[in-house]
């Protein structure tokens, strides 16, 4: 999955879908997209990066929850957010969703 496809999937097709699985590439490309855009907007205007960050909050939580489900973890792991290490470890694990051939 490429970055454009991952962003399109997370923002339009699965904006608030917390149940289906998310592949590693889908989640990490989407997270990279958010980081890049927030950094660029922060350079231009703080308020714009804040608005974009708020707009991307639901799809990021949805993608993170779907990624946790794909690795066989409960979404309750989001409560460990202050210590983000367990989440990052779980998000990097192989999931149950077979990779799609390119």
Image (cartoon, rainbow, N blue to C red):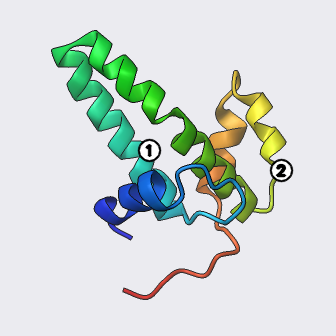
- Which numbered disc covers residue 74? 2
Is 54 situated left or right of 39 in this image? right
Which residue position holds label 1? 31
2 and 1 marks in contact (CB < 8 Å) = no
User: Which of the 4 quarters of the picture holds residue 4?
Assistant: bottom left
Residue at image location 44% in from the left, 32% down from the top? 55
Classify mark 1: helix, strand or loop. helix
| Residue that appears at 32% across and 66% down | 2
Badge 1, how many Cα within 10 Å: few under 14, some, many 20+?
some
Residue 7: image x %, image y %? 37, 55
Residue at the extreme left of the image, as rendered: 44
Quadrant placement of the N terminus? bottom left
Compared across the picture, whether 75 is left or right of 100 comes to: right
In this rendering, position of residue 17 left or right of residue 99: right
The x, y position of residue 67, in whole percent, is 64, 56
**Above or below 37: residue 3:** below
Q: Nearer the viewer, residue 60 or 85?
A: 60
Q: Which of 65 and 47 is in front in this view?
A: 47
Alpha-carbon span between mark 2 and mark 1:
20 Å
The crowd level at tag 2 (other Cα within 10 Å; few <14, some 14-19, many 20+) is few
Q: Which residue is drawn at 72% across and 39% down?
A: 86
Whether residue 21 is situated above or below residue 60 in the rendered picture: below
**Who's the residue at 37% across and 38% down the image?**
34
Q: Nearer the viewer, residue 90 or 77?
A: 77
**Which element is circle 2 on?**
loop
Q: Which residue lies furthest to the bottom in this view?
A: 101
Quarter of the figure that contains the C terminus: bottom left
Say above or below: 27 vs 46: below
């Amino acid at each position: 999955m490429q970055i454009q496809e991952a962003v399109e999937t997370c923002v339009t097709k699965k904006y608030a879908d917390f149940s289906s699985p998310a592949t590693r590439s889908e989640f990490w490309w989407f997270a990279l997209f958010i980081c890049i855009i927030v950094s660029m907007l922060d350079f231009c205007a703080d308020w714009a990066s804040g608005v974009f960050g708020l707009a991307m909050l639901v799809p990021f939580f949805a993608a993170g929850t779907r990624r946790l489900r794909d690795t066989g973890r409960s979404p309750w792991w989001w409560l460990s957010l202050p210590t983000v290490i367990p989440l990052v470890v779980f998000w990097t694990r192989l999931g149950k969703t077979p990779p799609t051939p390119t």
